[in-house]
Amino acid sequence: MACRCCGARQVELVIDLGDQPHCNRLVRPDLAPGVEPHYPLRVGFCRDCTMVQIDHTIPKESMFTDYPYVSGTTKTLPAHFLATSQRIAAAYEVKPGDLVVDIGSNDGTWLKQWAFSGARVLGVEAAGNVAKLAQEAGVPTWHRFFNAACCADIRAEHGPAKIITAAGVFFHLEELHSVVEGIASLLDQDGVFVVQAIYLGGMVENTAFDQVYHEHLCYYTLKSLSALLERHGLEVFEASLVDIHGGSIEAHVTRKGVRPVGDSVRAMQAQEIAKGFGEIETYRHFANNVLDLRTRLVALLEGYRNAGKSVWAYGAPAKGATLLNSFGIGPDLVQKAVEKNPMKVGLAIPGVRIPIEAEEGARPDAYLVLAWNFISEFLLKEKAYLAGGGELIVPIPKVHAYGKESA
């Protein structure tokens, strides 16, 4: 394949997770097995620009026009977005009336956190169902895909943006270059683009292979992200790691030469070189670690089953579908998933067909925590359950069961 970033045909396969269904296209439990379409889920490494990416694209219109994920489900994300907004507003002197645009704004959770600043906000969200939730909550939201044409329309109607944000969405972009071109055209002269994306380095170190699914087309290090941005006259001038979604890179971006490049960028560049994040051997080793993880997790779940203990999934996030389908974990090992998101209740995880029920009533002997990136919040929430003998099994970064000692 041609690299999504640089176009070079130097992309080499490093992980093959087999054919899998679209993780967020939940299905009715009564559908015949195998009815849902499956697509290749393979990860490659570009030897030219070091971009890690999957090689099959499900059209964005199929994946994102109706979407079951909402940002406001947990307490963690709103608090994270408020702290991030306050930090950005202070750093770049955001004033009342300045325009803040959020890419893939979902239900408006991040934009709501800008209320303190007096800034004008605008979300752009492709999924009609969640865009409607944002609009009903009073968050100005355009229901369309964010790309260069969309940015031209925003600038014509609202003027240039002081701040553009993208959290948990920048790896979703089928129109990758059109999006970055649009960001460059929409930013004010001294405007800043703040992107948070799951950090490939953290994925490697935590064996977080479940972050790989068809919606996630690209997986970023600072080097590969910079390679993309520089093609459109943009550059990263500050970079850091933030403790969200299991570890994300936060890059602050502006037009090349507008702001001095900080020491944080040079430090991260040096760290990535030292850890081999630009070398294909790193990702081959990562693939071997995934196989080891499968052996340990399946053995643990089989132990629970053989002991007559019940295990349910705690939540049904997209990444859970990757883990379950990759490891062949079905209802024989995990009987059901419980969810607080009503858009998922009554359906089933595609492929493995684990049914999803409401988070209420009876409890199992143990939960498999598929949304492991929120484990700190869940441990607080489930103190009484753990004290009573329940367990939370976390598969990543290493297989571990939390019990009474964690209550």
Image: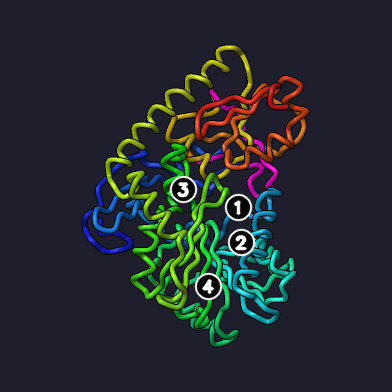
* Upstream in sequence: badge 3 or badge 1: 3
Camera-nearest residue between 391 and 273:
273
Asked which secondary structure carries label 4, the reply is strand
* Local crowd size for mark 1, using a 10 Å CA cut-off: few (<14), some (14–19), many (≥20): some
User: Mark 2 highlights which residue?
Assistant: 106
Q: Main secondary structure of the magenta part?
A: loop
Separation (CA) of disc 2 from disc 3: 19 Å
Left of 309 or right of it: where is 188? Answer: left
- The x, y position of residue 115, in whole percent, is 73, 69
Q: Residue at x 64, y 80 (%)?
A: 98
* Upstream in sequence: badge 2 or badge 1: 1
Q: Residue at x 51, y 52 (%)?
A: 241
* Upstream in sequence: badge 3 or badge 4: 3
- Tell me, yes or no, whether the two marked residues, 3 and 1, touch with CB atoms within 8 Å: no
* Local crowd size for mark 3, using a 10 Å CA cut-off: few (<14), some (14–19), many (≥20): many
Asked which secondary structure carries label 3, the reply is loop
| Mark closer to the observer (4, 2) | 4
* Upstream in sequence: badge 1 or badge 4: 1
Instruction: Tell me the amino acid under the disc marked 3.
Output: His
Left of 40 or right of it: where is 74? Answer: right
User: Mark 4 highlights which residue?
Assistant: 192
Q: Which residues are magenta?
A: 333-350
Separation (CA) of disc 2 from disc 1: 8 Å
Residue 391's label in the rendered image is none
Quarter of the figure with residue 48:
bottom left
User: Mark 3 highlights which residue?
Assistant: 22
- The x, y position of residue 43, in whole percent, is 34, 46
